[in-house]
Amino acid sequence: MEGSGFSLRALPHPEFSGWRVCAFAALTQAVAIGFTLGAVGLFAVPMAEDLGATATQFNLAVSIFSLVMNLSMPAIGRFLDRGSIRAVMTTGAAVLSASLLLMSRATQLWQVGLLFGVGCSIGMTMLGPIASSTAMASWFDRFRGRALGIANAGAPAGPVVIVPIAAYAIAGVGWRSTLLGFAVLSLIVALPAIRFGLIDHPSAVGQFPDGDEPPERTAEGGPDVSAAGAAMWDARGIVRCRDFWLLALAVAPFGAQGIVLGANAIPFLLHQGATVQAASFAPIPMSIGAITGPLVLGSLADRIHPRLLFMALCVTICLAFAGLMSGPGYAASLALFAVCGVVGGSMMPIYGALVGRLFGVSAFGQVMGLAALVGVPVIFLAPVLFGYAFDYSGSYALGLAGLIASLLVSTGLFSFLGSGEARRSAAREAAAPG
């Protein structure tokens, strides 16, 4: 995208800019998630009344969203690794806004499914977690887990603000006018954040990861270990790596549960007998937990191997789903949603730290994109099967049991992942003078 004439040049900064970039990355994630997956549950009932939709059809739209997101991630990840992160995010903001605008004018259910499942999905993917995580991987090394935690805290923070306001907006002016507001606000917030807050790489402003001084060996003209690491990984090398397949297959169910729960938390409470206004608060404890989780566990990922943290998260959320299966009351359900939020919100920073440890910075976006492609069947089928399980049984228990089973498989796969230490040693040896 750099060669397309789309140039967003940043001025040099006298102090380390990484933490400022991190803060604005959190803001763009709040927009990307808050106006899509974070709020989608609010529109299920009014759209069903206006256009007609079953739980299976509603979750099918979420599945299409997830399918398109995962199918587009390899190409987007490649652009992020080799092009301009800012240009990708700017394009994503424009696509997201246009899709929300057109959704507000939709007259048939298939139009909503197409615009949300394709347009909003591509816009969110270009603007959201993979883009900001790639930027964090570039700006940080020793503090990568902490930075990823802060940046990814923006994703759950968005719904904390957006969902309650949107719930009252839908009640007052309807779902169409609310979507129109989403379209306008997504541009008003995202474009200035990208233009004035995001910088693709530290080298663009004469800086280095973590605010460090220039690496001594590289400054003297010696070999660059990161360059040697980059040479180890192209798409063919990645897909031939055993750890890549273990990682991709383990992460897929973990990502699927977050999508399923985010889309069905409000309908779950409605099924329990809560009012629409009461049910609209479901994303709040999830979001508060998802803000807290990355900030704490992201920093832990700098000191504890992310593989072990992932295994602990899998066990924890299985226990939370078991609690939801028991049919708890409103308050207990909100508490369990908060636990799910901590786990789900911690996924991206820990995942990013794990990818960086196993494959390095230069292949970061490409590994995430290819892993997303591997996870397409799971990400696509999980919401559909969850909705079908509810339509079939009249209860959410069967679907939750299926999520628990898939996460136990993930736990086993994570246990077989390597540490990545041998691979980094090989990169250092490749960089050493002959």
Image (cartoon, rainbow, N blue to C red):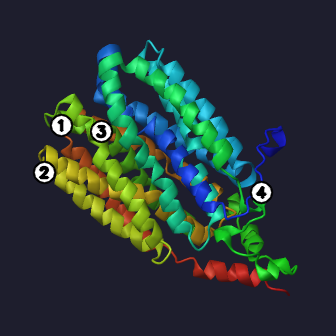
Marked residue nearer the N-terminal end (4 or 1) = 4
Could you give the CA–CA distance between mark 4 and mark 1, rounded to whole angstroms?
Answer: 60 Å
Measured as percent of width and height from the top left, residue 426 is found at 69, 81
Q: How busy is the neighbourhood of tag 3: few (under 14 within 10 Å), some, or many (20 plus)?
A: many
Q: Residues within 10 Å of mark 1 (few under 14, many from 20)?
A: few
| Separation of residues labelled 4 and 3 (CA atoms) | 46 Å
Identify the residue at image location x=19%, y=46%. 397
Which amino acid, mark 4?
Answer: Pro
Mark 3 lies on a secondary structure that is: helix
What is the distance, in whole Å, between disc 2 and disc 4 at their CAs? 57 Å
Query: Secondary structure under badge 4?
Result: loop
Query: In this rendering, which labeled residue sits more in front, label 4 or label 1?
Result: 4
Query: Mark 1 or mark 2: which is in front?
Result: 2
Q: Which mark is residue 393?
A: 1
Kindly identify which residue carries mark 2: 326
- Amino acid carrying label 1: it is Ser
Evaluate if marks 2 and 3 touch, with contact meaning CB atoms under 8 Å apart: no
Disc 3 + disc 1, Cβ < 8 Å:
no
Q: Which mark sits nearer the N-terminus, 3 or 1?
A: 3
**Residue at label 4?**
12
Do the CB atoms of the residues marked 1 and 2 lie less than 8 Å apart? no
Which residue bears the numbered disc 3?
Answer: 264
CB within 8 Å, label 4 to label 1: no
Specify which label sits upstream in the sequence, 2 or 3.
3
Q: Secondary structure at mark 2?
A: loop
* Quadrant of residue 277 within the rendered picture: top left
C-alpha distance separating marks 1 and 2: 15 Å
Q: Is residue 40 left or right of residue 276?
A: right
